[in-house]
Image (tube, rainbow, N blue to C red):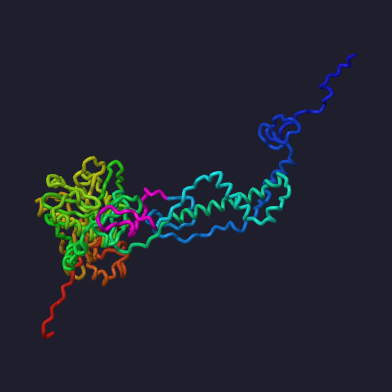
Amino acid sequence: MSNDITPDSNNKENLEVPCPLCNEMVRTGLVRCWNCGSFMREDIAEAYRKMQENPAPMIFSQLPDDTNHPVEENSHASTATMTAQTDDGDDDFDLDQSIDVREYQSSDDDFQLSGSLPVSNDKHIETIPLAREESAKEAEANTTTEKEAKPKSEQNQKTPAEDHSVATGGDVLLNVAMEEEKEDKKRRKGSGKRRRRRTGKVEGGIVVYCPNGHRIRVRQEYRGALGKCPACSVMYLVPSISDKEDETADQVPADEAAKTDEDIESGTLNAGAYTQWFNDLKLHSVDPTKLKLKPNSLEKSFVTIDLALSPEKILILGLVKSGLLGGGSKEKQDKIRAEISQHLREEKEDSEIPAASVQMINADQIPSLRVAFPTMYDHESVFAGVPVFGKGRIAIALPKQEDAKENQYLTLSLTEYRKFFAAMSELYSLTNLGQDSGIPLTDQIKQVTCHYSEESFDILDNENLPLYEADSEIELTLAGRQCQACELIVSEDSRKKEKIGGKTGKGISKAKCPKCNEKFGNNSLWQITRAEIPKQTSPAE
């Protein structure tokens, strides 16, 4: 008889509850939501957060006393290896001998003075015997010997029965592993000591290179002998130059060295056909597509070069690599200049000039030189009248090199330009270089009269004043002031007496002109400082 009761009617409790975070229905009894992973109960979430904030402390087991690693003594230079580092920590590594990172020191064992091929002397080299398997008889004999060596009481002593789990416990296996590691390290250190060969360092001597390029320092006594490279064991020959010839090649007579220094200071080196020499000029390489027309934008983007001029060509010489900080010391540059001048004086090949970089301008290209800045009209200039190379710098456009994307400009000061113009006129009859640019080849001086003292004095033409101010070889002196309105001229001595613009003249721009009562302005007048010639006194004085 049915009472219309179904099995679902007995389960009145709900089997699913909503997730408090994403409201997804989750079966009752689950700790986390299957959808979002959040905890279903707040107390469990709080307990998990506390467990994360306070993790259980780590427990470290104590190491045995014999695991300290002694530090080996620092290793010295070796003839068989290329390492100059200490032996500490290099047990597992051997440097590749194909990498040349140091200078090798030759030993007596690497040479034979007879000239024939030397026989390698290996009496000082220790070797490691090769491992081999023991035969069955040898193993049995070794076992019998060990048993006889033990005391009879120890042989008769029985080992207590031990459970397998105890015998293979964690502490037992750890001790076995540590003993094996210790023995392995000792074996590796011992083999490393055997393969290292130490010799004394060669003091002085000469430097030679083996056919594979390894740098080796040998003593003078081995000149003319055959040697064996300590790194690759390849035979090489030490040059047989006599001591007298070697000293003659390395030393320069005192009078010749002094003359070379004087020539470098004066800028005229004895370089044969290259009669004109310019030191420390600036060469700029400009990419037209990246040019920024801003004042001084290219002032620091240059390399320092020397110019050597002959009737046939111009050499642009980079003495040192552009990456060196400061371009190298002055002593180094002077030494390179002396070597280049000797090379040119001996008329050797231009491709062998001992310089970091060499460019040539042939005689047929020299007439194409032109002044790119300043120009008479700004619209005719590539730089639109903007001093991108710096205030007061004169830029000369050089002939473009083949396959070059950048244009090259040689920038000069006013004094350097005048010397360069004189050399170009003398060697190549190039007298029209910069004639239409307004650069003064001589000082443009005019005479003016002071309004107060009525004394006359010389001043420079203010139109070319930036060229004079930027030249480090020209010293200027403030001679007077000129009113910007009525052009009244007052000498500096008179301005101080009349106290126009204050004692030092800082307020001259706002001071009133005594003639027109307008602001005086800051229009200064300059003159070149001349060296005073000492006055000759008479014998009576």
Looking at this view, is 62 or 17 the one in front?
A: 62
For the C terminus, the quadrant is bottom left
Residue 10 higher or lower than 98, as above or below:
above
Task: Report whether 132 appears left or right of 351.
Answer: right
Task: Report whether 350 appears left or right of 496.
Answer: left
Furthest residue toward top: 1
For the N terminus, the quadrant is top right
Residue 480 higher or lower than 193, as above or below:
below
Residue 540 higher or lower than 233, as above or below:
below
Task: Report whether 390 appears left or right of 64.
Answer: left
Residue drawn at the location 19% of the way across and 48% of the way down: 351
Residue drawn at the location 69% of the way across and 33% of the way down: 33
Looking at this view, is 527 or 349 the one in front?
A: 349
Q: Work out whether residue 449 can be spotted.
A: no
Residue drawn at the location 51% of the way across and 60% of the way down: 71
Looking at this view, is 20 or 437 the one in front?
A: 20
Q: Is residue 96 magenta?
A: yes
Furthest residue toward bottom: 540
The image shows residue 317 at horizontal and vertical percentages of: 21, 52
Q: Main secondary structure of the magenta part?
A: loop
Furthest residue toward right: 1
Q: Is residue 370 magenta?
A: no
The image shows residue 213 at horizontal and vertical percentages of: 31, 50
User: What is the magenta range?
Assistant: 95-123
Q: Work out whether residue 44 can be spotted.
A: yes
Residue drawn at the location 66% of the way across and 31% of the way down: 35
